[in-house]
Image (cartoon, rainbow, N blue to C red):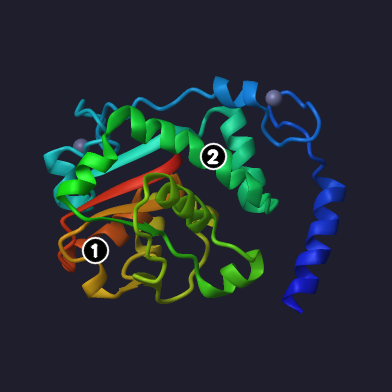
Amino acid sequence: MRLLTNKIKRFFLDLFFPKNCLGCKQPDTYLCRDCFNKIPLASNNTCFFCEEITGQGRICINCKKEKYLDRIISASEYKNPLIRELIRAFKYHYIQELANPLSQLLIKVLENNFNISSISSTSSILVIPVPLFKHRLHYRGFNQAELIAQEIAKHFKLPIETNAIKRKISRAPQAKISDIEKRKTNIKDVFDIVPSEVEGKIILLVDDVITTGATLSEAAKILKQNNAKEVWGITIAKG
Ligand SMILES: [Zn+2]
Ligand SMILES: [Zn+2]
């Protein structure tokens, strides 16, 4: 049944979402090399929350106490129109093959800022995608954060754990809640965790977009409560 639903989805997808570069409209690709190379990469020079200059995506000491994240590293800015189109196509039009080029952007940014293999020689690094609610996973057929996490893990030869954290209760999707305060309470205490998986490790917590940081921060909180050494929020876009 699910296979059939996916086939039907694919049919309508091709009908309504023809395969043209989302940047320059050239055929047979969703993102051509030229447009890929032109996407401006985020500098990650400041604390995501207060914009204090810190470098390498570091969260400043004050914000860290409240947000539980050590770094937030994003590949690009959501306000870039091409990035916005790409993420929209990836998430809402189910164009799964965009996981690769979008992850490549993130890999570029990570490589520009860090020597991951030297970090992983002294600390264990674990890649964890931010989980989706089960019903939304069934509806969409894939977790977009997980696809990106898999590419990151594969590239840097890092272990990935997709079941270390789980969503507890289903609530309204974050995007539908405009009020920032309401968004914060909406995601409070929604995660469950397998503690043994995260203890003493640097967690690369992967999501597609960071807006307020509330989701990543809530997940980071439970990771830290279970003795994760550091939590880095890793996203395709911010803003
Ligand atoms: Zn193009
Ligand atoms: Zn700060």
For marks 2 and 1, give the CA distance.
26 Å
The answer to whether the residue labelled 2 contacts the one labelled 1, judged by CB atoms less than 8 Å apart, is no
**In the picture shown, does residue 34 fall above or below 130?**
above
- SS type, badge 2: helix
What residue appears at the point 42 percent right and 66 percent down from the top-left corner?
162
Residue type highlighted by circle 1: Leu
**In the picture shown, does residue 174 fall above or below 61?**
below
What residue appears at the point 73 percent right and 23 percent down from the top-left corner?
24
Residue 118 is labelled as: none
Q: Position of residue 168 (x, y in %)?
A: 40, 76
- Ligand 2 - quadrant of the structure image: top left
Mark closest to the chain's N terminus, 2 or 1:
2
Position of 220 with respect to 95 (left or right) is left
Q: Position of residue 13 (x, y in %)?
A: 80, 52
Reading the image, the residue beneath label 2 is 102
Q: Position of residue 182 (x, y in %)?
A: 40, 58
Reading the image, the residue beneath label 1 is 223
Position of 81 with respect to 167 (left or right) is right
